[in-house]
C-alpha cells in the first residue's frame, strides 16, 4: 500500500507545479470518440502508459469531465496503470440528450450501462478492474446486475445510492414522479437546479481543499463548453427508480466490491449507502464498506488527508493479487 500512497502528490506540490501536470495531461492522455447505434457520440479519455502492469476503467460522476482526472492520471502513470475514463451520453464531451446542453437528462437509466458496455466492446476491454465515483457508482451497480461484460473487482467512492435529503423515500419519490408526469416539468430543472454557475469555495459541501476546488471550477470558466448544469426531474426519477430497484431486488454480489462513503456527504446519503451494503453481508462475495470520516462528497478533489487515504485504499483493493 505504501507504494500506491507514495504515487500521489500533495496540495503543496500542486500549487508549485500545475504547469508540469498540464503538460503531462496534454502529452499522455488520448481522447477517443465512438458513435453508438442510436447516433450518440460517446467519448472516452485514455491514459497512455508504456508497458503497463495493470489496467483500470473509470466511470465518472454526473458533472465530471476528463480534465478532472488529470492528477489521478499522473499518479496512475507512476504506478504503471493504464486507465480509461468512459463518458456515457450526457456526460463529459459525449452527446447531450436535450437540445439545451446544460440540462442533465436521461430517458432510461439503463442507457448509461449500455453506453459504457458499448465503449468497452469498442476498445476490446475484458477482465477489467473498475473504479467509479458518485453517479458512476450507481451505473456500476447496474452493470454488475444486468450486463455481460462485468469487471473482476470494483471500488466505489461516494456512490449515488440515494440523495442527501430529509424527506422520506416514499414522499420524495412521489413528488418527483408527480413532476415527471407533467410534460412541461419532466425536462425542467429540479428545485435549486440551473445552468452551470461557478461555485464559491466558502461554504461549499464538495471539498475542503481550496487549491483543488478552485482549479477545477476555474477550468470550467476557461472552457465553458464542458459545463453541465443541474438535473431534470426525469433524470432524478429514473435514478430513484434504479436506486429503489437495487434496494428491493434479490441481486447478490458475486465479485469483490469495496465501497467508501464520505462521512460528511451533503450530496449522497451515506446512511442509505451503508444500509444497502450491510443488507448484502451474507452474499456469495460480501462487499466491503467503509466511511471516510469528515470527508465531503467530492473525494477525488478533497484535501490530502481524505483524498490520498481513500484513493490509496481503492487502488490497493483493486490490484491485490
Image (tube, rainbow, N blue to C red):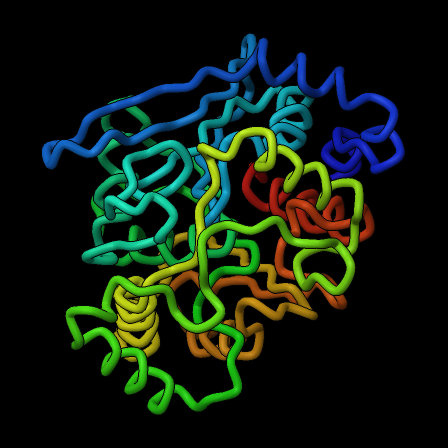
Residue 25 pos. (x, y %): 61, 18
- Identified at 19% across, 56% down, the residue is 107
| Residue situated in front as seen by the camera: 48 or 220 | 220
Residue drawn where x is 37% and y is 37% of the image:
87
Q: Position of residue 37 (x, y in %)?
A: 10, 32
Q: Residue at x 30, y 47 (%)?
A: 100
Residue projecting furthest to the left:
37
| Left/right of residue 47 with respect to residue 127 in the rendered view | right
**Looking at this view, is 268 or 230 the one in front?**
230
Horizontal placement of 201 versus 72: left or right?
A: right
Q: Position of residue 45 (x, y in %)?
A: 44, 25
Q: Is residue 315 placed above or below 292 in the rendered structure?
A: above
* Up/down of 19 relative to 105, above or below: above
Tell me if 78 is positioned left or right of 99 in this view.
right
For residue 78, side relative to residue 190 (left or right): right
Quarter the C terminus occupies: top right
In which quadrant of the rendered image does the N terminus lie? top right
Amino acid at each position: 500500500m505504501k507504494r500506491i500512497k507514495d504515487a500521489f502528490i500533495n496540495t503543496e506540490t500542486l500549487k508549485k507545479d500545475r504547469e508540469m501536470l498540464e503538460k503531462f495531461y496534454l502529452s499522455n492522455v488520448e481522447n477517443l470518440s465512438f458513435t453508438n447505434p442510436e447516433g450518440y457520440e460517446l467519448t472516452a479519455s485514455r491514459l497512455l502508459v508504456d508497458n503497463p502492469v495493470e489496467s483500470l476503467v473509470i466511470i465518472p460522476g454526473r458533472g465530471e469531465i476528463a480534465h478532472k482526472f488529470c492528477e489521478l492520471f499522473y499518479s496512475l502513470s507512476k504506478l504503471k496503470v493504464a486507465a480509461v475514463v468512459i463518458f456515457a451520453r450526457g456526460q463529459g464531451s459525449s452527446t447531450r440528450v436535450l437540445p439545451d446542453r446544460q440540462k442533465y437528462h436521461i430517458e432510461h437509466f439503463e442507457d448509461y450501462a449500455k453506453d459504457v458496455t458499448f465503449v468497452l466492446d469498442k476498445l476490446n476491454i475484458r477482465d477489467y478492474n473498475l473504479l467509479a465515483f458518485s453517479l458512476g457508482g450507481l451505473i456500476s451497480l447496474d452493470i454488475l446486475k444486468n450486463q455481460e461484460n462485468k469487471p473482476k473487482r470494483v471500488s466505489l467512492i461516494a456512490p449515488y445510492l440515494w440523495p442527501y435529503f430529509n424527506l422520506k423515500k416514499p414522499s420524495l419519490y412521489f413528488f418527483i414522479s408527480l413532476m415527471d408526469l407533467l410534460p412541461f416539468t419532466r425536462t425542467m430543472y429540479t428545485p435549486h437546479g440551473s445552468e452551470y454557475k461557478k461555485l464559491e469555495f466558502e461554504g461549499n459541501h464538495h471539498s475542503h481543499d481550496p487549491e483543488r476546488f478552485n482549479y477545477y471550477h476555474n477550468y470550467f470558466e476557461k472552457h465553458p463548453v464542458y459545463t453541465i448544469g443541474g438535473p431534470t426531474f426525469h433524470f432524478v426519477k429514473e435514478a430513484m427508480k434504479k436506486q429503489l430497484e437495487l434496494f428491493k431486488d434479490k441481486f447478490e454480489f458475486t465479485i469483490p466490491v469495496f465501497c467508501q462513503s464520505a462521512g460528511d456527504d451533503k450530496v449522497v446519503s451515506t446512511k442509505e449507502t451503508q444500509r444497502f451494503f450491510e443488507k448484502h453481508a451474507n452474499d456469495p462475495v460480501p462487499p466491503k464498506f467503509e466511511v471516510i470520516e469528515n470527508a465531503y462528497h467530492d473525494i477525488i478533489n478533497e484535501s490530502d488527508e481524505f483524498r490520498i487515504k481513500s484513493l490509496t485504499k481503492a487502488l490497493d483493493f483493486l490490484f491485490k493479487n
